[in-house]
Image: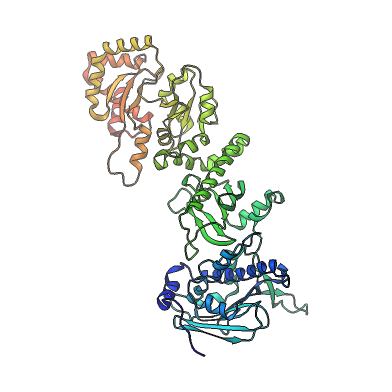
Amino acid sequence: MATKEFQAESQRLLEMMINSIYSQKEIFLRELISNASDAIDKMYYRALTDESITFNQEDYYIKVSADKENRTLTIEDSGIGMTEAEVEENLGTIAKSGSLAFKKETEIKDGHDIIGQFGVGFYSAFMVADNVTVYTKSADSDQAYKWESNGADGYTIEPAEKDSVGTKVIIKLRENTEDEQYDEYLEEQRLKAIIKKYSDYIRYPIKMDVTIQQPAEDEESEAVEVEEEQTINSMVPLWRKNKNELSDEDYESFYQEKHYGFDKPIKHIHLSVDGAVRYQSILFIPEQPPFDFYSADYEKGLELYSSGVLIMEKCADLLPDYFSFVKGIVDSEDLSLNISREMLQHDRQLKLIAKNIKNKIKSNLQSMLKDEREQYERFFESFGRQLKFGIQMDFGQHKDDLKDLLLFYSSKEEKLVTLKEYVERMPEGQPYIYYATGESYDRIDKLPQTEKVHDKGYEILYFTEDIDEFAIKTLMSYEDKEFKSVASGDLGIDSEEDKEKEESEEKENQELFKAINELLGDKVKDVRPSKRLKTHPVCLATEGEISIEMEKILQQMPGQNQQVQADKVLEINMNHDIYGSLKRAYDEDEEKFKLYANLLYNQSLLIEGLSVEDPVEFTNDMCKVMA
């Protein structure tokens, strides 16, 4: 019996197969099981046109057996088998796919899609094998054949004995090395775990002889271990079942089985799409974020299956970053996969699925916001921050998708409201959507800058998260209404009469404000009488794009070498008693004037939660006033 060479650049190609194409050695079992499933599918299609073949699905199976003593792993199927010519063509030529040829020649329907398309999966066995032996008997022949190979040196084919139609692949495992423990592929629990991970939804039963505990016949004796044949895989995935047959408990159980989280999903989305691209999907919106969700270690992505076989555990391309909290699976027969079936080619089908999933998530969140407000607010408490980040991402190109999903605390409603709800309540003549920033709702409520806006009866949105103002700056406006900070220069509230009065008072006291400005130097951009204060003596306002809250955040960012500062304006209330004292000091006592000016400036810093530049000097100044 002569050894034949592979019909390819055999040694080089097979070495590439073993060392480069697959990222994990355990995938060899997925590939061999997928081939076995294809062989049974081919028998199914033969039965559609051949009346002599009766296809009863319960008669077809895949069997995985481990023999520790002989270091062999066997994968056997009851599929269509191969003739001698097919063995030569399919196993003697690397990258020759009999399944792909069958798929091109046969109209695939009834959900029996052929998995193998590249003709390389079989050779993944050589990642773990010293020797691979195949026994096969075709439904078209009474003669069985044996194919055997030690790898790149070639293979042999000879007649053999085999009672039943089908194929048996026997892998002689390599010896353990310092880096690799090949014995693990003989361990029952490890094999079960690999089957469940990659091939749980193969439509035919994958059987194994499993060790179980059984009571001894003698009640006084201990339990005995016996072997029992069990079906390891689930076969029919939840996503292929009719939604009407499933309960919320079924979806919750699936969520827990997949270890998507320790919480319960707040919502599930079950999709079955048969259009330009076919796919099925179950998506979950969790109730709570995982512990690492807002860290660099978090990996987004959906599980990706192709015809029930796991291709990727986390396919990031199926979710936009702002919906990265979504968990779930996608199963499609239409995706273009790379040769190892571990990665996607970036093609039109993938983009269509991703776009559709994005739209479905968005529409479901909108429905929850409209019809299940309390539930949506629970969701937003967990993941609203990520939606706000989404507004900023990619130079704001997603803001139209997300703006109606945002919630902010309202000074008027004293609860979370949408931007749409705010705008619908705006009184006629209100020029802006007003907001204020701070560490908490209570702190914001006491800010001096809010006084005049409150006095006009205008609603203020309270921003307490570091991302809030950045998101709003990106959004810029909502329904043609611009956003305006209560600390910004011009609030757009004053009447012409008020403006004339204020300008007149400012001119009268111009020298005093100029003196304070010179005294404070580059600590502030300007000092001026306040148009917004009513009962408070002093506050800080800002000019330009950087607010005081943004300054705090930017300066805390890692790697921030440049000092980012807001253009601060010190505003003093000319109607407050303190202004009278300040004016008298300016006219009569230069040292006291400097003392008052510094105190007012430091008070304005404390109100904003900023550090006083010299705490010792500040306390000494306070003591001077008290003395």
The answer to whether one can see residue 260 in this image is: no
Who is closer to the viewer here, 320 or 501?
A: 320
State the image coordinates of residue 447 (x, y, percent, origin top left).
Answer: 42, 26
Q: Residue at x 60, y 68 (%)?
A: 38
Q: Residue at x 53, y 22 (%)?
A: 425
**Looking at the image, is 133 positioned above or below residue 374?**
below
Quarter of the picture holding the C terminus:
top left
Is residue 452 shown left or right of residue 66?
left
**Looking at the image, is 239 positioned above or below residue 34?**
above
Who is closer to the viewer here, 53 or 472?
A: 53
The answer to whether one can see residue 477 in this image is: yes
Q: Quadrant of residue 51?
A: bottom right
State the image coordinates of residue 476 (x, y, percent, origin top left).
Answer: 41, 31
Q: Residue furthest right?
A: 218
**Looking at the image, is 149 positioned above or below residue 94?**
below
State the image coordinates of residue 289 (x, y, percent, origin top left).
Answer: 53, 48
Who is closer to the viewer here, 304 or 147?
A: 147
Q: Residue at x 55, y 68 (%)?
A: 101
Is residue 581 shown left or right of residue 12?
left
State the image coordinates of residue 325 (x, y, percent, origin top left).
Answer: 52, 48
